[in-house]
Amino acid sequence: MSTTIVIADDHAVVREGIRGLLRIDPGFTVLAEAENGETAISMVREHRPDVLLLDLMMPGMGDAAEAMIGLIRKASPETHIMILTSSDDDRLAFKAIEAGAHSFLLKSMRGEHLMNAIHAASKGTPTLHPLVAQRLLNSIRNPQPRQFEDLTARELEVLRCLAEGGSNAKIAAELNITEKTVKAHLGSIMSKLDLTDRTQAVALAWRAGLMKQ
């Protein structure tokens, strides 16, 4: 089944380049394009694509990027929002993820890697550009205080393992528990911390420096 995509970027040349790249793979179908945030919301609401490729640097975004992501998620909760931008600013990445973006990619990445990331997104798997992930990890020197009192000791261990890049299977092996138990703990963590997905949980753990404890 084809993965449906909407491309949102204010540069026509960039949209053309991405569309041309995606034509290589018969598993991708570009439904629409948008040159600003308002049109992106409209296109997502109309087409409800599997994936939205969204540039945060478009005119009219700026400080409204977080609100824009929230509106897009409200318009189509099932759409996987992939940020594809030229900025690797740590704060921008954190804010985008916390607002509900599922993946954060840079335009400097190779075309094949973008296509792989879209395939992963179609299966619900988030992707962070390696450079962004490394800089986010390295930038955490004065983490913002965050209360985890509601989490049990085991839930904290699961969250730490998740922040360090562990899959459910890897977490289960490290903590000597079943994958079913890992899933149960993750569900409890999401509920207690009012999170919607694993990407947000990882971002929160990074900001809190949980993996260093």
Image (cartoon, rainbow, N blue to C red):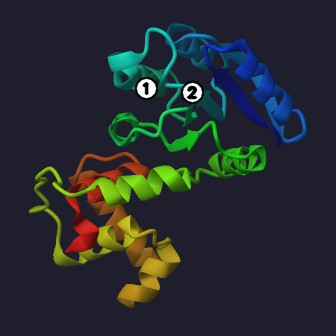
Q: x, y (%) of residue 125?
A: 58, 54
Q: Secondary structure at mark 1?
A: helix
Kindly identify the residue that appears in the image at 36 percent across and 86 percent down. Answer: 175
Please determine whether, in this image, residue 23 is positioned above or below residue 138.
Answer: above
Amino acid, disc 2: Leu
Amino acid, disc 1: Ile
Q: x, y (%) of residue 124?
A: 59, 50
Q: Is residue 177 visible?
A: no
Residue carrying label 1: 69
Kindly identify the residue that appears in the image at 66 percent across and 15 percent down. Answer: 11
- Position of the N terminus, as image quadrant, is top right
Residue situated in front as seen by the camera: 53 or 130: 130
The mark tally for this picture is 2
Between disc 1 and disc 2, the foreground one is: 2
Q: x, y (%) of residue 96?
A: 40, 35
Kindly identify the residue that appears in the image at 24 percent across and 72 percent down. Answer: 212
Residue situated in front as seen by the camera: 141 or 213: 141
Residue situated in front as seen by the camera: 141 or 58: 141
Kindly identify the residue that appears in the image at 48 percent across and 25 percent down. Answer: 56
Please determine whether, in this image, residue 30 is positioned above or below residue 146.
Answer: above
Residue carrying label 2: 54
Which mark is first along the chain, 2 or 1?
Answer: 2
Please determine whether, in this image, residue 121 is positioned above or below residue 42.
Answer: below
Query: Are the residues flagged by discs 1 and 2 in contact, CB closer than 8 Å?
Result: yes
In the picture, the disc for residue 147 is none
Q: Secondary structure at mark 2?
A: strand
Which quarter of the picture shows residue 28? top right
Q: CA distance from mark 1 to mark 2?
A: 9 Å
Q: Is residue 67 left or right of residue 4?
A: left
Q: Callout 1 environment at 10 Å: few (<14), some (14 to 19), or many (20+)?
A: many
Q: Callout 2 environment at 10 Å: few (<14), some (14 to 19), or many (20+)?
A: many
Q: Is residue 119 left or right of residue 66?
A: right
